[in-house]
Image (tube, grey):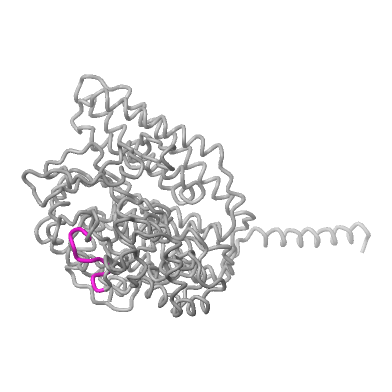
């Protein structure tokens, strides 16, 4: 063979080999995964694009109103165009919600605030009154205050433009200061779970949609979560689990999209939470193990929580202002003894149990507690909130205990006297010495009592057992009641599941106070506001007159009478009050009422169903 022929042959073989290699590279493998170095950078690009779309549509929302004139038909066209662009802007906002709510909670809360005056009270010298703006404000102005037949007034246009401008400025600022590259896999799992919980606990209730257009929002959130998850496909050791997530998220999207369920009043919230949210909690836990995640800390909900409705759901440390040690049975027993000890009060006649009877879900059954000015609130689930007393004046259980000790109408003593009384009791001294390294101290006394109260959160109600799958006994009336509570009756927009108090999920960082217009007497003809000024008495903030904390509804059938002044004796009376529109519905005109003033228009049967559900909140 000639040399030239030999070289050509060798060259041909090499070219064929290279071509084969290239060909093999170009053929996609069935099981190939995306090669992604930093999933958060990929998510950031989508996030910023959604913010850009949100800004663009908010600008268009404003622009459409610039053409309003006196012609009614012409007005209607531009109002509808403005509403259309708002919906598209809101859709983009819901796409950024899972990220924004986690990485920038304060800005998310501001952009998604209700159209009510915001009051921040750090102390008596630092009180801020802030006009709200953002998506809820715009929605209310565009859909509830804007007539469909046109003739929109100039003042409404001005308010829409003003709120839109502030919203645009805040979104632009967020866009310019976004860097998601610092986040880790465990952050993604946290925000992913938060988004699922937010849909279940506030999204499907209409909490942030005053005109009731929120169900589509939840589908948008789930679609975005499904999209985000694709960037973490490589993290799954178990490839079947990734597919399980895709199927689960798609099932939720389909459930939110079914024609017979997408009507706000008809949506089956009970089935959604039980069959979607609760199952996804289980899958989330398996994912954390599959990814071999080592969480650096616990948030409000335990990292290994298997249900929203369980005594192992919440992290008690998150709700305390001090680091809690191990809460043992012996510490709870000690706390119970102190709780029931009348010798700790100045007159030797009062203990904590005087106003908080265990048989009555730790209330006293009286309209106003003896010697006090208000109704005794239940202490069940008291540990799982961020504010204490009817006026939210204490920030911790320990702080509440100190206030009771010092109050001249309650224990009327002080920490030093309490310490002395405990030290003089040899049984107490022995118990404290065995349970606490520094034996009897003022702090240990408070902690023991607080630990006893922390044990009042058993999550053993009929609802809990049905939601977490240990039994299947809910009646159709109870299911209807739950769906009404979480939807049409609007109860869950203030009493948030699963705690059914005013501590806002999924972050649980704030316990809300509300103005609902509670009357001084059970009177619907000549009703007058109760004279108790509530939160106003703490800092004398004018805009906080008659505001009170939203209490838990757990064990509600055992805690009559109701409201801070015990004005209502039955749940039927309470439901009638809310069904009328609160204080506004019985003739009490309050500028800052936070409860929607329109009647709920619940039928007699619907009211019975809500009450049937409320009774499922009683613990065993």
Is residue 614 shown to the viewer in this render?
no
Q: Residue at x 34, y 45 (%)?
A: 538
Relative to residue 261, is residue 101 depicted above or below?
above
Relative to residue 477, is residue 261 depicted above or below?
above
Q: Residue at x 43, y 48 (%)?
A: 95
Would you say 182 lies left or right of 584 here?
Answer: right
Principal SS element in the magenta part? Answer: loop
> Dividing the picture into quarters, in which one does residue 353 lie?
bottom left
Q: Residue 548 location in percent, x, y?
A: 28, 49
Which quadrant is the N terminus positioned in?
bottom right
Q: Residue at x 45, y 77 (%)?
A: 428
Is residue 85 shown to the viewer in this render?
yes
Which quadrant is the C terminus positioned in?
bottom left
Q: Residue 481 location in percent, x, y?
A: 20, 63
Q: Which one is in front, 99 or 530?
A: 530
Q: How many marks?
A: 0
Residue found at the very far right of the displayed protein: 3
Q: Residue 169 location in percent, x, y?
A: 46, 32
Q: Is residue 366 magenta?
A: yes
Q: Which one is in front, 120 or 443?
A: 443
Q: Residue at x 33, y 64 (%)?
A: 273
Q: Residue 154 location in percent, x, y?
A: 26, 22
Would you say 567 lies left or right of 555 here?
Answer: left
Q: Is residue 555 magenta?
A: no
The magenta-colored residue range is 359-369
Would you say 486 lies left or right of 322 here?
Answer: left
């Amino acid at each position: 063979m000639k040399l030239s022929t030999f070289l050509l042959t060798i060259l041909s073989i090499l070219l064929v080999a290279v071509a084969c290699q290239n060909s093999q590279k170009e053929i996609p493998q069935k099981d190939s995964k995306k090669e992604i170095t930093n999933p958060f950078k990929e998510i950031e690009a989508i996030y910023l694009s959604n913010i850009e779309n949100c800004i663009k549509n908010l600008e268009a929302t404003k622009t459409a109103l610039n053409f309003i004139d006196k012609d009614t038909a012409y007005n209607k066209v531009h109002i509808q165009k403005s509403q259309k662009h708002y919906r598209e802007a809101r859709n983009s906002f819901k796409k950024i919600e899972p990220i924004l709510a986690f990485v920038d909670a304060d800005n998310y809360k501001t952009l998604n605030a209700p159209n009510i005056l915001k009051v921040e009270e750090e102390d008596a010298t630092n009180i801020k009154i802030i006009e709200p703006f953002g998506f809820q404000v715009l929605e209310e102005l565009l859909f509830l205050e804007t007539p469909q037949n046109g003739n929109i007034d100039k003042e409404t246009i001005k308010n829409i433009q003003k709120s839109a401008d502030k919203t645009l400025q805040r979104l632009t600022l967020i866009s310019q200061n976004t860097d998601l590259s610092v986040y880790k896999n465990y952050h993604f799992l946290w925000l992913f779970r938060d988004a699922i919980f937010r849909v279940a606990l506030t999204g499907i209730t209409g909490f942030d949609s005053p005109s009731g257009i929120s169900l589509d929002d939840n589908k948008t959130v789930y679609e975005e979560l499904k999209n985000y998850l694709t960037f973490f496909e490589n993290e799954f050791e178990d490839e079947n689990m990734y597919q399980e997530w895709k199927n689960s998220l798609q099932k939720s999207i389909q459930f939110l999209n079914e024609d017979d369920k997408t009507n706000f009043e008809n949506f089956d919230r009970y089935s959604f939470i039980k069959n979607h949210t609760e199952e996804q909690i289980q899958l989330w836990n398996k994912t954390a193990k599959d990814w071999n995640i080592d969480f650096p800390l616990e948030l409000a909900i335990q990292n290994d929580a298997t249900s929203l409705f369980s005594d192992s759901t919440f992290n008690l440390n998150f709700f305390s202002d001090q680091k809690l040690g191990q809460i043992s049975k012996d510490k709870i027993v000690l706390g119970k003894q102190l709780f029931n000890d009348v010798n700790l009060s100045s007159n030797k006649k009062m203990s904590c149990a005087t106003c908080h009877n265990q048989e009555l879900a730790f209330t006293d059954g009286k309209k106003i507690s003896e010697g006090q000015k208000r109704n005794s609130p239940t202490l069940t689930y008291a540990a799982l909130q961020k504010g204490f007393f009817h006026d939210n004046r204490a920030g911790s259980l320990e702080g509440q205990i100190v206030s009771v000790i010092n109050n001249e109408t309650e224990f009327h003593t002080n920490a030093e006297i309490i310490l002395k009384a405990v030290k003089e009791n040899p049984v107490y001294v022995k118990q404290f010495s065995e349970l606490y390294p520094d034996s009897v101290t003022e702090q240990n006394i408070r902690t023991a009592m607080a630990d006893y109260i922390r044990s009042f959160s058993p999550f053993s109600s009929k609802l809990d057992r049905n939601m977490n799958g240990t039994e299947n006994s809910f009646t159709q009336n109870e299911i209807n009641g739950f769906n009404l509570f979480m939807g049409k009756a609007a109860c869950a927009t203030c009493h948030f599941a699963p705690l059914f108090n005013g501590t806002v999920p999924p972050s649980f960082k704030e316990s809300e106070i509300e103005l609902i217009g509670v009357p001084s007497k059970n009177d619907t003809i000549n009703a007058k506001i109760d004279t108790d000024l509530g939160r106003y008495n703490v800092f004398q903030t004018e805009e906080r007159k008659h505001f009170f904390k939203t209490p838990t509804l757990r064990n509600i059938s055992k805690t009559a009478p109701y409201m801070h002044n015990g004005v209502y004796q039955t749940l039927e009376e309470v439901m009638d009050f809310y069904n009328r529109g609160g204080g506004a519905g019985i003739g009490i005109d309050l500028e800052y009422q936070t409860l929607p003033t329109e009647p709920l228009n619940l039928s007699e049967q619907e009211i019975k169903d809500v009450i049937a559900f409320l009774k499922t909140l009683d613990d065993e």
